[in-house]
Amino acid sequence: MPKAVVMLSDNDLARAYHALVIALSAKAVGYEVYLFATGLGAYIFSKKSKTRLVGLPFLASLFIRWKLRGLGARRLEDLAKDCLSSGVKVYVDEPVTKMLGLEPLPGVEMAGSLTFLALAKEAELVLTF
């Protein structure tokens, strides 16, 4: 089975949507998928999920969520749960997780750069967001 590694390294949580959709799509077409979340992306896979669009004023964030809901787009929390339930192997950056005082969701492992590099070396596809 081909391997795909997806890294969510940007602190822009709006990009997380695309990373999760790509991870789920790769899983659906037969890839063994590994997703690494670092920076603020670690919040998505923690017990105190924080998925507000960081940096946007409240009304702009509200408008974007309203438009996405109208388009039938899924919430980040739901996409994260779908990744875990579909068999995507999810890792969160251990130093960031400890620094932010987060507790990963069940099924999410803490890992560092060496784990990412080892998997990326063996993968047919490596994507960063």
Image (cartoon, rainbow, N blue to C red):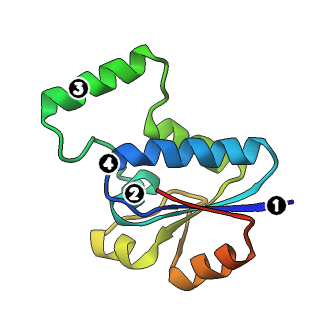
Q: Secondary structure at mark 2?
A: helix
For marks 4 and 2, the one nearer the N-term is 2
- How far apart are the two marked residues, 1 and 3, measured between alpha carbons? 39 Å
Disc 2 target residue:
41
Give the label, 1 or 2, closer to the camera.
1
The crowding category of the residue bearing disc 2, from other C-alpha atoms within 10 Å (few below 14, some 14 to 19, many at least 20), is many
Disc 4, disc 3: CB below 8 Å?
Answer: no
Left or right of residue 117: residue 57: left
Examine the rendering and report whether any part of residue 86 can be seen. no
The crowding category of the residue bearing disc 4, from other C-alpha atoms within 10 Å (few below 14, some 14 to 19, many at least 20), is some
Give the label, 1 or 3, closer to the camera.
1
For marks 1 and 3, the one nearer the N-term is 1
Q: Secondary structure at mark 3?
A: helix
Disc 4 target residue:
50
Q: Residue at horizontal 28%, vertical 41%?
A: 52
Position in image of residue 104 (x %, y %): 47, 62
Could you tell me the amino acid type at mark 1?
Answer: Pro
Which residue is at the front of the view, 28 or 125? 125
For marks 4 and 1, the one nearer the N-term is 1
For marks 4 and 3, the one nearer the N-term is 4
Could you tell me the amino acid type at mark 2?
Answer: Gly
Q: Secondary structure at mark 4?
A: loop
- How far apart are the two marked residues, 1 and 2, measured between alpha carbons? 25 Å
Could you tell me the amino acid type at mark 4?
Answer: Lys
Left or right of residue 73: residue 56: left
Residue 2's disc is 1
For marks 2 and 3, the one nearer the N-term is 2
Left or right of residue 87: residue 91: left
Residue 109's disc is none
Q: Quick one: quadrant of the N terminus?
A: bottom right
Q: Is residue 99 above or below residue 2?
A: below
Give the label, 4 or 1, closer to the camera.
1
